[in-house]
Amino acid sequence: MRYLWIPLVLAACSSQGVTDTSAARSAVPTPAFSSSSAVEHSLTGSGIQNIAPGFVYGLSGAIHSDGSGRVWGTMITSIIDLSAYGYAGKAEIEQAPTCLRVVGNTAYAGLVVTHSTDPVLAPVGSRAVVWMRDGGPGAPDVGHGGPAYLFDPNNAICSSTPPVMPADAVTTGNFNVR
């Protein structure tokens, strides 16, 4: 039975797309291994912010940036309870990062909504922001997220002077800023 595999392996290796010559190898590293595309900063984790009765939401995801300033990842906001603001439903809002700035143990990120289970609450294409301070082992993480039109109307979240936003403890969960 094993002898039946030999012709198949030889045929696969002799196909036009498979070569083993040094001319076919590139000396240029692939983007995943070049220094400009290595992860330089990140905000990762998940948690719930139970800010007050009728004001509870969760955040989860990972945002990364490389040495050239390219950002990638996903952040998901789960609306658990916004009844204090007259919103009776629940929602899931998926966001892609537009920028990430890390200063010490604090991360600031600009986001754009890519998917929403409630397009009235969070329309696709709308901007959002989040900031998070990693408290380290045994200390609470602190941060806040929300719509950019409320917290960052001048789009300064990733600048050297980000907007002042509420500092609310992450009541359950953990975030890491690197």
Image: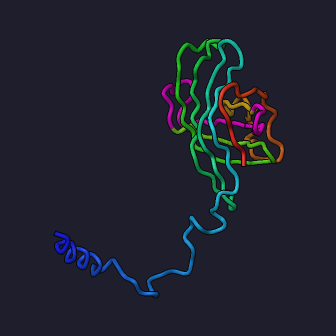
Front residue of 140 and 126: 140
Q: Is residue 12 left or right of residue 76?
A: left
The main secondary structure of the magenta stretch is loop
Q: Residue furthest front?
A: 1
- Considering only vertical position in the picture, is 76 above or below 120? below
Q: Position of residue 90 (x, y in %)?
A: 53, 20
What x and y, as percent, mark residue 48? Answer: 64, 26
Residue 38, image x and y in percent? 64, 61
- The quadrant in which the N terminus is found is bottom left
Q: Nearer the viewer, residue 95 or 178?
A: 178
Q: Position of residue 101 (x, y in %)?
A: 74, 48
- The residue drawn where x is 51% and y is 27% is 119
Residue at image coords 65%, 57%: 39
Whether residue 156 is visible, yes or no, is no
What residue sits 80% from the left and 47% below the top?
A: 103
> Depth check: 86 or 67 in front?
67
- 175 shown above or below 89: below
Q: In the displayed image of the protein, which residue is found farthest to the right?
A: 161
Colour treatment of the image: rainbow
Q: Is residue 21 above or below residue 50?
A: below
Where 65 sits versus 142, above or below?
Answer: below
Q: Is residue 126 highlighted in magenta? A: yes
User: In this view of the protein, which residue sits in the foreground, 122 or 41?
Assistant: 41
Please provide the residue range marked out in magenta.
115-140
Quarter of the figure with residue 70:
bottom right
- Magenta stretch: residue 114 in it? no
Whether residue 141 is visible to the viewer of this picture, yes or no, is yes
Q: Is residue 73 left or right of residue 168?
A: left
